[in-house]
Amino acid sequence: MVERSHHVDAAVPVASRPSVMDTVLARAGFRPTHPTDRGALTPLSGVGIDTVYLTGPTTEQLLFELSNQQVHRAIDRGTGELTETAVRARGQVEVGFTRARVSGFRQRGVPMMGVELSLPCMIHGHNRNAIDAADLEEFADAVLCSLTWDLPDVPDVDQVTLARLDIVSDFHGVESPSWTLTQVSRHPVARARHHEQHVGADGKVQTLTRGSKTQWLIRGYDKEQQLAALARDACTDSDLLNAWAAVSSGMLRVELQLRGERLRRDGITMTKDARPTLLEGLAQKYFVRGRFDVISGGLPAARHLIEQLSATGVSDADLRVLSSYLLSDLLDTRFPGERKLKERGRALARRHGLTGSTLLDPDEPRRLDFDSRSELRGEAALRHRT
């Protein structure tokens, strides 16, 4: 952990105050990364972390330090004495290469502080490369250490709880992220109250979000398009963001956002609880729950084939036998029926000039594979899913 510091007087020049970057740069040499930096393009082997929201105990003094305040005033009628009590407050504080959203509030009468920020933006100046899940506690401590130079009574890392955690899984080599997201969006999610699509100017789906806003959300988006959009809106660092957008083609990010009670239910209260193996399992669990593991393509071609054969007079019974035969031929598995039915299926396939691969034409099936963080195609997409 980095060494904790103390709130300094405003008379101390800002330029002379150490920051989280001083500590982290000295420890690991982090800096705003560019695509040309050695190792910057190396994807994480597991899940990563983006945005966190930490909450912990503080004092009323911190609430009064924040720029926007809601204050309760009480006047003693006898003495005329005015008493002010800070109810809640909010503000922004520079932390590394980003600005943290800091809030003050009361929980059962106790003053509390909350801080929300993107950890990769703090270190790199962008969030294209998530931080390694194993480093979460160390980075959270660095955030709190930095805040002590601008705010009083910032809690220690062992006093804060996680109120939000964004777990990132990046899929590389996806031919068309927008096509894949469109296909996934057609599969409903049980007990998900929120379903939202963001469509770009070209009419293609760029972001798909589903889940529950207060507990969990899983979001898939085209990272190249997102970085390009940020570059267009940025007053500064547009060159950096454009450079990262240029090397993010075919990158689909699936981001799991866990909040509040859902984090508690999944076994995470403090940063030390967020073990990489636990986060990996949670990311996979919600990846499947959000239906991001569905097979896209292929099946529409199979349905079209069945419709064509039905129109030529093939009976429903023969269509069922033929479908089973072609699927077992495609997957090279045992025919799920009697020998005579298999022979009937083979005869029908020969009569119509069909093989198992016919089911894949013209639309090759695809599936996002969580284990390999890639998009599988063809027969590989039809094999055992996570």
Image (cartoon, rainbow, N blue to C red):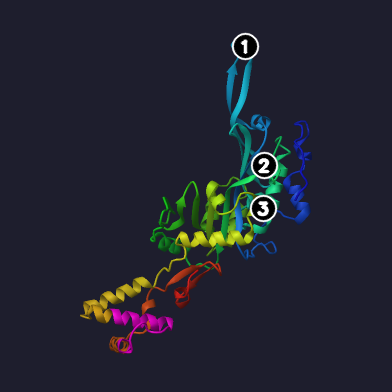
Task: Give the distance between the C-alpha atoms of the residues marked 2 and 1, in whole angstroms.
Answer: 40 Å
Q: Are marks 2 and 3 in contact (CB under 8 Å)?
A: no
Residue 226: where, in percent of width, then height? 52, 54
Residue 119: where, in percent of width, then height? 64, 51
Q: Going by the image, does 177 lie left or right of 106?
A: left
Residue to which mark 3 is pinned: 272
2 vs 3, front mark = 3
> Badge 1 local density, few (<14 within 10 Å), some, or many (20+)?
few
Residue 118 inside the magenta-drawn segment: no
Residues drawn in magenta: 320-342
Q: Earlier in the sequence, mark 1 or mark 3?
A: 1
Residue 334 inside the magenta-drawn segment: yes
User: Tag 2: residue type?
Assistant: Glu
Q: Secondary structure at mark 1?
A: loop
Q: Is residue 385 visible?
A: yes
User: Tag 3: residue type?
Assistant: Lys
Residue to which mark 2 is pinned: 94
Residue in front for this viewpoint, 357 or 346:
346
- Residue visible at 62% across and 16% down in the picture: 82
Q: Majority secondary structure of the magenta segment?
A: helix
User: Tag 1: residue type?
Assistant: Gly
Residue in front for this viewpoint, 318 or 349:
318
Q: Earlier in the sequence, mark 2 or mark 3?
A: 2
Residue 51's tag is none
Q: Is residue 125 visible?
A: no
